Image (cartoon, helix red, strand yellow):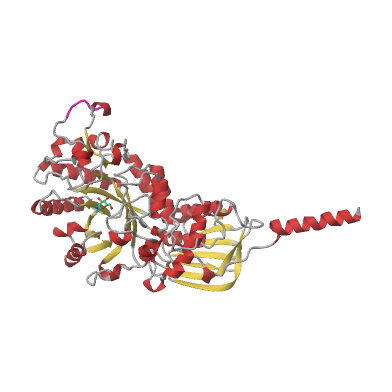
């Protein structure tokens, strides 16, 4: 009996030891997997133990940081299963979020110190706290799902990080016009890109195939123009309330929404709705589909309106640049969207207007720019807009032609760097990729990583560059899972180019760090491309 008791006792001891007794190995801070790589990481010996008793302490006006504290709480809960309390008083075993002007002289900078009994994230602005949280989350050795932590304790390496971004504009673009994506999908994407300190989401809200945002003064844009997509599906659109919800959600993740209405080309979805805007363009016959206005609840026929474009050919449409109605139309559209948009930019597109004569294109862009200015926004446009006289506050988005980007610079404008051959997320990874296009290039992960905005052209120098953006065009992309597959891992590479100093970047090290992210994505059920260049 005694023997049996002692046997049971030892068994219990062993089970306890395995189930909750020991702590995990701590990976030292200099072997971290943080993406984008921070400016400076100084490891120290020892660890901090995150457990159910750890508190989140807010050392700032709650109005400014309460939501950030809650974001941290829910992120930690998703990763570890721990449910932390939020408190105001300082104490041991705490993650402290402190607004502190001396933490960094950079607007979006932050400091993260992990000590024996405390984690301190300090920053001059709430945005910096949010970025500090992103780095902290990438030091937590658990990915959610099946949690590897023992005894509900998670061991974080001691050390300190000082960090700030290279560029103030770190963006992604989602084309919701070729295929429409729901508010829920866009929110999910916002959460995914915020992890990589992306701070702008450009929404391509209109194109030949679909008009995706409600304009109250031109209601048929959505009833008719919204009811189509590539392949001829039913499309969809955001009500103004939906758009506002996206804007607010993005704000809570320190992401600015940049709305784009592409003009004067890429406008067939407006010409579907209002024949009065149509200068007499021809929709490619093979993919033209008549609009059944009755079926959409619109009684009047409009013989001047165009058929739907269900294909992916570009460059056949234009607004009538001579007609006063056109300017009334774009004034209304820019006004209504600007009123819903707190961010500083309105993107007027301006690309591939192949059927607009240059002598018409130039004054059109200049007028559109004036209207954007009238409604208090700065103009963004694809690089072709540099043919027009740009305001110094306007920004040209370099996607195709360096000479256009240089023309913009020569006029005193800044450029946003999105070269199709490096930064286009719709380009296939290689010839076997089942989604995407390859007109610009195949872009493997190392190709997406190994470049620098200042090394593309001698004339495009650091001081001319506003930032970097990775666009995802969606001719071939129809689901959230498709979005994830084309976006990850490449967006992480672009994010590192936009955030981290050139001197801190290195492909070998990135390929090691990204493998860790692959594990986290896998645990989170996120789709991504398992590049053969990485040992996942
Ligand atoms: C070019 S990039 C376009 C888009 C297409 C994209 C496909 C740009 C300004 N125009 O209309 O969707 O290629 O990669």
In this rendering, position of residue 59 left or right of residue 26: left
Q: Residue 423 at what x, y percent from top left?
A: 32, 60
Foreground pick, 476 / 42? 476
* Residue 299 lies within the magenta run: yes
| Position above or below: 165 against 16 | below
* Magenta stretch bounds: 297-301
Q: Residue 455 at what x, y percent from top left?
A: 29, 71
Q: Residue 152 at what x, y percent from top left?
A: 64, 56
Foreground pick, 81 / 439? 439
In this rendering, position of residue 249 left or right of residue 517: left
Please say whether residue 98 is visible from this viewpoint: no
**Residue situated furthest front in the rendering:** 432
Please say whether residue 306 is visible from this viewpoint: yes
| Position above or below: 132 against 307 | below
Please, what is the dominant secondary structure of the magenta stretch?
Answer: loop
Q: Residue 528 at what x, y percent from top left?
A: 44, 53
Foreground pick, 125 / 11? 11
Residue at x 28%, y 61% (from the top left corner)? 419
Residue at x 57%, y 67% (from the top left corner)? 27
């Amino acid at each position: 009996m005694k023997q049996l008791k002692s046997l049971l006792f030892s068994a219990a001891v062993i089970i306890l030891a395995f189930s909750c007794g020991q702590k995990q190995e701590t990976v030292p801070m200099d072997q971290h997997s943080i993406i984008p790589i921070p400016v400076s990481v100084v490891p120290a010996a020892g660890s901090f133990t995150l457990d159910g008793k750890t508190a989140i302490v807010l050392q700032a006006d709650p109005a400014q940081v309460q939501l950030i504290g809650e974001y941290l709480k829910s992120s930690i809960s998703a990763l570890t299963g721990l449910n932390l309390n939020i408190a105001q008083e300082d104490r041991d075993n705490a993650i402290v979020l402190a607004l502190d002007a001396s933490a960094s002289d950079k607007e979006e900078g932050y400091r993260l110190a992990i000590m024996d009994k405390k984690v301190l994230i300090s920053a001059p602005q709430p945005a910096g706290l949010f970025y500090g949280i992103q780095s902290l989350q990438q030091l937590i050795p658990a990915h959610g799902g099946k949690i590897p932590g023992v005894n509900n304790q998670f061991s974080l390496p001691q050390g300190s990080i000082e960090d700030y971004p290279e560029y103030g504009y770190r963006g992604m673009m989602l084309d919701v016009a070729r295929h429409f994506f729901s508010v829920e999908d866009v929110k999910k994407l916002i959460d995914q890109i915020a992890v990589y300190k992306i701070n702008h989401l450009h929404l391509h809200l209109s194109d030949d195939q679909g008009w995706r945002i409600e304009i109250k003064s031109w209601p048929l844009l959505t009833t008719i123009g919204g009811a189509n997509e590539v392949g001829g599906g039913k499309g969809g659109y955001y009500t103004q309330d939906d758009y506002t919800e996206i804007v607010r959600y993005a704000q809570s993740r320190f992401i600015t929404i940049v709305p784009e209405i592409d003009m004067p080309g890429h406008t067939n979805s407006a010409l579907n709705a209002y024949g009065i805007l149509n200068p007499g363009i021809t929709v490619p016959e093979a993919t033209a589909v008549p609009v059944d206005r009755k079926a959409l609840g619109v009684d009047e026929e409009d013989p001047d309106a165009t058929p739907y474009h269900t294909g992916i050919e570009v460059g056949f449409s234009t607004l009538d640049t001579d007609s006063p109605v056109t300017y009334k139309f774009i004034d209304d559209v820019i006004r209504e969207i600007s009123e819903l948009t707190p961010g500083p930019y309105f993107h007027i597109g301006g690309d591939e207007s192949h059927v607009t004569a240059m002598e018409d294109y130039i004054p059109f862009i200049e007028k559109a720019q004036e209207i954007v200015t009238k409604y208090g926004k700065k103009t963004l446009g694809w690089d072709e807009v540099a043919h027009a006289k740009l305001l110094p506050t306007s920004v040209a988005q370099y996607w195709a032609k360096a000479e256009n980007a240089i023309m913009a610079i020569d006029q005193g404008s800044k450029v946003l760097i999105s070269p199709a051959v490096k930064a286009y997320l719709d380009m296939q990874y290689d010839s076997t990729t089942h989604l995407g296009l390859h007109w610009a290039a195949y872009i493997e992960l190392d190709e997406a990583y190994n470049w620098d905005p200042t090394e593309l052209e001698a004339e495009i120098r650091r001081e001319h560059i506003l930032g970097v953006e990775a666009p995802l065009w969606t001719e071939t992309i129809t689901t959230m899972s498709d979005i994830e597959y084309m976006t990850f891992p490449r967006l992480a590479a672009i994010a590192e180019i936009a955030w981290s100093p050139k001197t801190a970047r290195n492909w070998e090290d990135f390929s090691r760090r990204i493998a860790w992210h692959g594990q986290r994505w896998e645990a989170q059920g996120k789709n991504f491309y398992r590049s053969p260049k990485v040992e996942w």
